[in-house]
Amino acid sequence: MSSSADASRTTLEAALRDVHATLVGLLEAAGEQRAALESRDRERLEAVSARQESLTLRLEHAERVRMTCMPAASLEESIALLPAEPGRRIARLTAAIRQSVLDLREQHARNAALLQRSLELTGHTLQFLQRLVLGQPPTYSPSGLAGMSHSLVLDGRA
């Protein structure tokens, strides 16, 4: 194998290692995000979001490097062109990347569901407080509680 092909293989493997390490960091951050959501720690949530943005930029860079150093159009084709041992190492690495992506998607779905539920509970709390403060009965629509309606009739004191 030529030194150019060796360098390309080494760069590809390094880029894939960086992709995997970044995905592991994103998984850790998603776990921290969930903990911050559960504890309602806004400052911690903002810090985790900033870390996730930084990791996302790192992942984009690693992906660009990976794409430029692949000797073939697809990763599978590129792996097939490699000698046996480096090909196996890179294949194991890509399998770990696939699993990390699946785990990350799952964690993000759980966090999104938690956020959605938190928003719904906040909405219900606001509706309750409005009814309590304004003393108006709730209005209903065909889909359920519609929230507060305000009368368009002016009070005689106005």
Image (cartoon, rainbow, N blue to C red):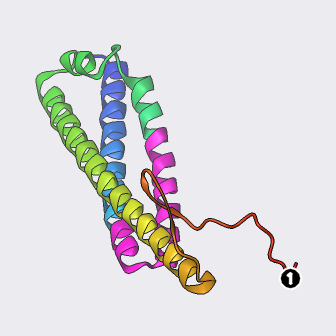
Residue with the mark numbered 1: 157
Within 10 Å of disc 1 (Cα), the crowding (few <14, some 14-19, many 20+) is few
Residue 52 picture location, percent across and down: 46, 57
Q: Residue furthest bottom?
A: 133
Residue 1 rendering spot, x and y as whole percentages? 25, 16
Left/right placement of residue 99 relative to residue 3 reads left
Residue at the extreme front of the image, as rendered: 156
The stretch in magenta equals 32-60
Q: Is residue 13 magenta?
A: no
Q: Position of residue 152 (x, y in %)?
A: 75, 63
Q: 84 or 121: nearer the eye?
A: 121
Q: Position of residue 2 (x, y in %)?
A: 31, 17
Q: Is residue 25 visible?
A: no
Quarter occupied by residue 40: bottom left
Q: Residue at x 33, y 73 (%)?
A: 35
Q: Residue at x 49, y 68 (%)?
A: 123
Most common secondary structure along the magenta stretch: helix
Is any atom of residue 151 visible in this view?
yes
